[in-house]
Image (spheres, helix red, strand yellow):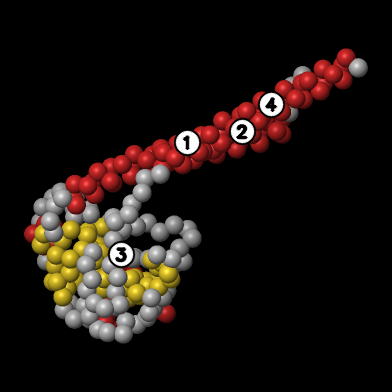
Amino acid sequence: MKRLPVGLTLAVGVALLILLGLGTWQVQRLHWKEQLLADLARTRAIPPVALDGLLTQPDDHVWRQVTLACRSDPRDFVYMHGVADGVAGFHVLTHCPTGQGGLLADLGFTAQKPLASAVATTTLTGRLRRFETPNAFVPPNNPEADDWYTRSVPDLSKRWNITLRSDYFVAATQPVAPGLTPVDAAANLSNRHLEYALTWYGLAAALIGVYIALLYSRRRAEMRKGIA
């Protein structure tokens, strides 16, 4: 074999770059998850505090547990599509007044829409969270049809005709009404990114091995043909 097969070599090169890129991405995710779990361990040891007092401090308060008074008017509820424990349903969203603008509150998950019972004014206990960046597979909100898929601050601010804070929302960690189940995103976070990274790197190594074996097989076939 005088030269490498161009088409095969290019295909293997592209696949190898993709596999190595995915492995490196998982390593980056590993470092991010380790920091996240460290933050969670720190915040779990801190009892809930009043929201307004906490937000006057300049620190990063993500995952901190807080308490706040929140008037939950069922007419203001937004039902955001979601899945919890394999069951399709809705996250019930509302807004709570604070000293620095409205705060989005996720009251919990329900399989029915609307709720059978109203939620009265309550003291809400929950965890401060950052807003997620939706991926390309999540449909856009349709406010005109009251059909919701993301916690979009601009969309929900317009829906409620208020100014929502864009730094945090609060997700209930204790029940606020019958039929509503708190979904604590911090409850069962796993960290398997090292496993995923090793899988991608292992596939890359296997691809190199297969490529070398194929070249060796072709070379031997050419040598046998030359002897014959």
Which kind of residue does numbered mark 3 sit on? Val
Is the C-beta separation of discs 2 and 4 under 8 Å?
no
Residue highlighted by disc 3: 183
Q: Earlier in the sequence, mark 3 or mark 1?
A: 3
Residue highlighted by disc 4: 213
Which kind of residue does numbered mark 4 sit on? Ala
Residue at horizontal 38 percent and vertical 76 percent from the top: 111
Residue highlighted by disc 1: 198
Q: CA distance from mark 3 to mark 2?
A: 41 Å
* Left or right: 11 in relation to 205: right
Q: CA distance from mark 1 to mark 4?
A: 22 Å
Residue highlighted by disc 2: 207
Q: CA distance from mark 3 to mark 1?
A: 31 Å
Which kind of residue does numbered mark 1 sit on? Leu
Which kind of residue does numbered mark 2 sit on? Leu
Relative image position of residue 128 (x, y in whole percent): 22, 59
Is the C-beta separation of discs 1 and 4 under 8 Å?
no
Label 3: few (<14), some (14–19) or many (≥20) C-alpha neighbours in 10 Å: many
Q: Earlier in the sequence, mark 3 or mark 2?
A: 3
Relative image position of residue 32 (x, y in whole percent): 33, 43
Label 1: few (<14), some (14–19) or many (≥20) C-alpha neighbours in 10 Å: some
Residue at horizontal 27 percent and vertical 84 percent from the top: 117
> Based on the displayed image, in which of its 4 quarters is residue 1 positioned?
top right
Q: Earlier in the sequence, mark 2 or mark 4?
A: 2
Say which element carries label 4.
Answer: helix
- Total labels: the figure holds 4
Say which element carries label 1.
Answer: helix
Say which element carries label 2.
Answer: helix
